[in-house]
Image: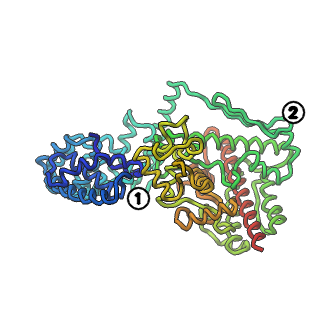
Amino acid sequence: MKRIKFYPVNDLLCGYNLNNSEQVLKPYANGEEISDINVAIEIFNIKKYFDAEIFLSKWSSEKVECLKAQVQEAFGQVAKFIKLITQDNLAFLYESLEKQYEDDFWYLINKFKVYKNINDEYFRSFLNHSGIKLLHLLRNRDITRYYGNIIKEFMVKKDSTAVLLLKHYELEDEGQNKQLHLPDQLSNEDKEEILVKYIDNENANLNYLKLIANIQSNKNEIEINPKTRLKAKRKVQIIEENFFQEKPSMAIKMSVSFLNFSDKEIFNSVVEDGSMSIAYNRKWILENDDYATILNNFIYLFEYVDTQMRIMLVNSEETMSVFERLVHSNSKKAYKKGLGFEQINAISSMQLSGYYNLLLSENIRLEDVVEWFFKDYLSSEFNIKNFQITMPSENSTILEKCTNIMPTLESVLKQFTLLVKDGEIDFELLDIQSEQLMYKNIPSLVENKYVYGIGEEFEQVTFLLFSDQSLLSYHKKQKREYDSYSDLMSYENFKRDDYSDYELTAIDWLIEHGYLEVDQEEYINMKNSLLINILKNLYYKKVISYWKYNLENRKIIDELCKRDIVKFESSLLTKPEQDYINYFLNKSQFNNGFDLRNKYIHTQPYSMQSEKIHHQNYTIFLKIFILIVIKINDDFCIFEELQQQNS
């Protein structure tokens, strides 16, 4: 009989684990004493399902109440069994333990405080000879505190401790919500020693080395010497160079060109054998060289933003493969990005660089176009007359351009902030403000501008309907593969009887909460396609623009807000856009960012290819400036449209 294990992630789909619960519970609910550690832990896992109110759909309410009583009786036997653990039987019980139950074993020892039955000398010996997994042990705070010195000694000499430190300080939680508790006796010097030993290990994992190279010191957590980070960085470079020398790699070619087309098409793209080439109609661009069209080309030609004016260059679920999302070791302090993100941003930089040079050949500077937007366009279009801006001059060196463009960008954003808050730009007030610009704090002229998903219900419904990891996305009778359950339902029809009991647990939840319905012929369908499309957009893009939807859709969003499934926020930039800009410009939020703003203010990047690096970085600065122009224009457009509607 397969033992029952509680899985907290997406637990609506884990009810099938309870199929054998009645047979497991019955003898011990009737007074039989437990003699097997695995039975004790299995009953504990059953109790976790009942505590979470997860039951099989075939159980009646009377059956559930009966089983609840049995669980309580059986768990009394579990407590009695666990409290009998001493140093006389600890090793035997641990050796008898099934692998899936090791975390529960230490949890129960911690819960019932039976570690007090085991003296220091025995525990030290047990720790050194049992092959114990520190990961499971360190999830229990009281045990860690009780044996602090012993666990600290063990950690310093154990090779795998570096990985545990990275799990604690750097790695994402992986959805398990199980915090590690390090002994207080483990000093910062101990932690650094552990990491240095790991760097020197010839079998060190490349992903973990990258994490060490990007660790941000924090006196309340872990402080790492810059030399240690540099040592890890150099080890990474050596491993990567050796890897690509020994193994053939597949090059992904990308090209952007501006050509004279013989026909009227504006651009064409070709994707073939892993390579991508995009060509734009040079003649059309030069014939339509008014400043407004030049800026519009970033929207409609280069597609820097989508129809809701959300920046398309940010990382998203859609641009990451399943492997990148689930397998790659990500620091919880790192900006999440995959190959798709790198490709999109490489193409956008090539678009901007080629476009910049093409315009320059006609004596049009993109910097002048940006100045025109703030000085002339905003004045004529929205009656905003006093924006001040001075972009890098034509005669500036590339280094000077990189150094000067950021203060200019921050100045216009601070001017916009004053305009939103006070209705005017007071330059004396601007001059005496010294606080650093925070992109998340830049306001919007528009109330309820953006919508974000929140809460357990949002997480549950979007996972079940749209995730490629949802068990509902696969059905044994389906005709082809689908990326999600919503896609499957768009092309195929299934009845309730076509699903197994554990799948019906999730489907019934979706029906009860108004996302699915059963028609007269017993087929399961989406109840409201508009609602599903809104949720789908939120799942993939993380945010939607409220005023880009028509009234019917906005009413649905309003109802979701009343149910605490979504929330409204107003800012110039969406949260993904704030993250994107912070990734490139500073390290206030992410430890793997480019930190370009601070590098040019404090040190200026240096390498043997300094000129080339400065050109690449200036392209990034200019790209972000163009994106800010688009976002500010969109904010004024929405605001003016709403004013006209209300007048």
Q: Which residue is mark 1?
A: 219
Residue 588 in picture, x, y percent from top left: 54, 57
**Identity, as a three-letter code, of the amino acid under mark 2:** Ser
Q: Quadrant of residue 645?
A: bottom right
Q: Nearer the viewer, residue 343 or 271?
A: 271
Looking at the image, which residue sits at the far front?
A: 520
Q: Is residue 35 above or below residue 257?
A: below
Say if 477 sits above or below 83 in the image: above
The amino acid marked with disc number 1 is Lys
Front in this rendered view, residue 583 or 89: 89
Is residue 111 or residue 360 the one in the foreground?
111
Image location (x, y in percent) of residue 330:
47, 46
Q: Which residue is mark 2?
A: 262
Q: Secondary structure at mark 2?
A: loop
Instruction: From the image, state whether disc 2 or disc 1 is nearer to you.
Output: 2
Q: Residue furthest left?
A: 88
x, y percent for residue 231: 45, 41
Number of marks present in the image shown? 2
State how far apart marks 2 and 1 are (Cα): 64 Å
Q: Which of disc 1 and disc 2 is earlier in sequence?
A: 1
Residue at left offset 73%, top offset 56%: 630
At x 67%, y 45%, the residue is 614
Q: Look at the picture and state if 561 lies above or below 82.
A: below
Query: Which residue is located at x 79 percent, y 37 percent?
Result: 258
Quick one: quadrant of the N terminus?
A: top left
Residue at 84 percent of width and 42 percent of height: 361
Q: Classify 10 Å Cα crowding around label 2: few (below 14), some (14-19), many (20 and above).
A: few
